[in-house]
Amino acid sequence: MAFTYLLNTNSGVVRLLIPDNKPTSYLFEDDEIDAFLTLEGGVKRAAAMALETIASNEALVLKAITLMDLSTDGPKVSDALLKRADLLRKQADLDGEIAGGGWDIAELVYDPFGYREILYSGYWP
């Protein structure tokens, strides 16, 4: 069970954005934060994925419950977290944070037949 909160590291900045910065009651292990960074490729996108994970947990666990004078609304909390995650993804897009690399496939064309085959098969817009 490892928890580090150093703002000069990517995982520390992710913790700042979600916020998960209390050593006595943290939500994610360092390895989980590192996994988000690996999967998403950027700090804001990793924070968005962490918030989406928290949101799905809130919706599953809390539900909407009223008991005496106490009430919880998991779906409402989940919705707020998902809106924050969406905002972080939009900020990452504006900042030029690349998700998964610049492009996926580059197909080479060597002759006119290959060009026609790709053009008419619907690969190119």
Image (cartoon, helix red, strand yellow):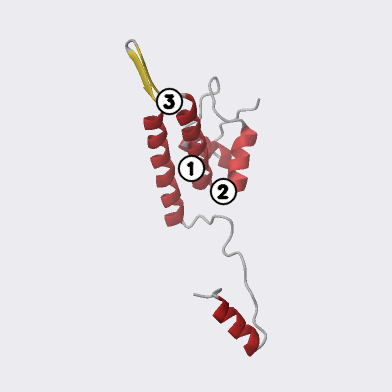
C-alpha distance separating marks 2 and 1: 9 Å
- Where is 71 relative to 50, above or below? above
In the picture as drawn, the residue positioned furthest to the top comes out as 68
C-alpha distance separating marks 3 and 1: 22 Å
Q: Nearer the viewer, residue 96 or 85?
A: 85
Secondary structure beneath dot 2 equals helix
- Viewer-nearest of discs 3 and 2: 3
Where does label 3 land, which residue?
Answer: 63
Tell which circle, 3 or 2, labels the residue nearer the N-terminal end. 2
Q: Nearer the viewer, residue 37 or 6?
A: 37
- Where is 116 relative to 72, above or below? below
Where residue 81 appears, x then y in whole percent?
A: 42, 36
Tell which circle, 3 or 1, labels the residue nearer the N-terminal end. 1
- Whether residue 9 is visible, yes or no, is no
Residue at 42% x, 56% y is 94
Residue at 36% x, 31% y is 76
Q: Are marks 2 and 1 in contact (CB under 8 Å)?
A: yes
Where does label 2 land, which residue?
Answer: 40
Amino acid bearing label 2: Glu
Where residue 1 appears, x then y in whole percent?
A: 66, 25
Where residue 53 appears, x then y in whole percent?
A: 52, 36
Position of residue 101 in the picture relative to residue 48 (left or right): right
Amino acid bearing label 1: Ala
How many numbered circles does the render carry?
3
Secondary structure beneath dot 3 equals loop
C-alpha distance separating marks 3 and 2: 28 Å
In the picture as drawn, the residue positioned furthest to the left comes out as 69
Amino acid bearing label 3: Lys
Tell which circle, 2 or 1, labels the residue nearer the N-terminal end. 2
- Where is 116 relative to 31, above or below? below
Quadrant of the image occupied by residue 8: top right
Where does label 1 land, which residue?
Answer: 48
